[in-house]
Each structure stands twice: as C-alpha cells, then as structure tokens.
C-alpha cells in the first residue's frame, strides 16, 4: 500500500535554483507528486509548523531561515514513503550524508540543508494537512 509524506524544498533550494534537480531526483526514485505548491512562509506559519522545536537553541534561526524566501511544498506518495524519502535525502548534516543523497549533492550545511521530510507516517499526515486540503490532493496518484 502506498504511503504519503511531505517534503519542503527550503529557501536555499529555491534561491540556488535547484528545485528542478531535486524534484527530478525524487521522481527518479519513483515518488509520485500528489500535490505541490510554492508559498512564502510567514514567521507565524513557520513557527506553527516547527512548533515541536520551540525552545530549542536552533528554533529562532530555523524560523528566520524558512521565511527568507519562498519554498516549494510537496505531498509525495510511494510504498514506505516516509522512510524512503528520509533515505533519499540523507543525513541532516550533508558532511555525514551518504553519497548520492540530495543533501550530499546540494546542501551546504546542517542548517541550510535544502529539504525537509516528515519523520513518521503520523507526522506526515499532520504536515500534509498543514499545507494542503483533501480536495487539493490527487486521490490515488497518477501511476497505475
């Protein structure tokens, strides 16, 4: 059964004009895009999305970074999508990421790491609904 997950192409990805390469990488790993949009997060929206990190030393810097320019938000679908996407993007620190992963290829630092991915199926559902309504999502994907 296919599972859904959320990815966010972060401001550094958009600023460096890497969005096409990252999306192509995801498609080549057999992810289906069931919804996608570009948005510019406000401090309030980014703060709500990353509320789980509130109080941690990096929280303010993360919110500032996520609001500095537009992002591209994607709802993705695939078998074991959450675990598979986390494998495809690599370690948060690009210096520790496996060869061929998105972060190894494109990220410059642990803080500016190109892409966000949901960390569990439960969080994926919450995160997808944060950005997309049910009527926006393609119901069964597009690959038969």
Image (tube, rainbow, N blue to C red):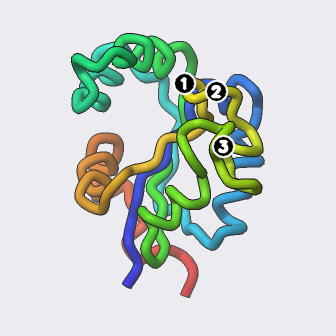
Q: Is residue 73 visible?
A: no
Q: Is residue 118 visible?
A: yes
Which residue corresponds to the image point at 43% horizontal and 19% vertical from the top-left? Answer: 62
Q: CA distance from mark 1 to mark 3?
A: 11 Å
On the image, numbered disc 3 is attached to which residue?
Answer: 103
Is 31 located above or below residue 72 in the figure?
below
Q: Which mark is residue 111?
A: 1
Q: Residue extending furthest front?
A: 96
Q: Are marks 3 and 2 in contact (CB under 8 Å)?
A: no
Disc 2 secondary structure class: loop
On the image, numbered disc 2 is attached to which residue?
Answer: 109
The residue nearer to you, when weighing 4 against 105, is 105
Residue 96: % across, % down: 64, 43
Which residue corresponds to the image point at 70% horizontal and 23% vertical from the top-left? Answer: 15
Q: Are marks 1 and 2 in contact (CB under 8 Å)?
A: yes
Of the two numbered discs 3 and 2 on the same chain, state the one appearing first in sequence.
Answer: 3
Which residue corresponds to the image point at 48% horizontal and 30% vertical from the top-left? Answer: 39
Which residue corresponds to the image point at 42% horizontal and 52% vertical from the top-left? Answer: 6
* Figure quadrant of residue 115: top right
Quarter of the image for the C terminus: give it: bottom right
Q: Residue extending furthest bottom?
A: 144
Relative horizontal placement of residue 114, taking residue 16 as reference (left or right): left
Residue 64: % across, % down: 45, 12
């Amino acid at each position: 059964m296919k599972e859904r997950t959320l990815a966010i192409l972060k401001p550094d990805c958009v600023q460096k004009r890497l969005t096409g390469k990252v999306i192509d990488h995801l498609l080549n790993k057999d992810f289906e895009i069931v919804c996608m949009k570009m948005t510019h997060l406000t401090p309030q929206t980014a703060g709500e999305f990353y509320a789980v990190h509130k109080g941690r030393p990096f929280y303010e810097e993360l919110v500032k970074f996520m609001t500095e320019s537009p992002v591209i938000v994607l709802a993705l679908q695939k078998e074991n999508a959450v675990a598979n996407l986390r494998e495809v993007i690599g370690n948060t620190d690009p210096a520790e990421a496996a060869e061929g992963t998105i972060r190894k290829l494109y990220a410059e630092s642990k803080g500016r790491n190109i892409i966000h991915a949901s960390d569990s199926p439960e969080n994926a559902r919450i995160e997808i609904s944060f950005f997309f309504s049910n009527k926006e999502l393609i119901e069964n994907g597009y690959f038969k």
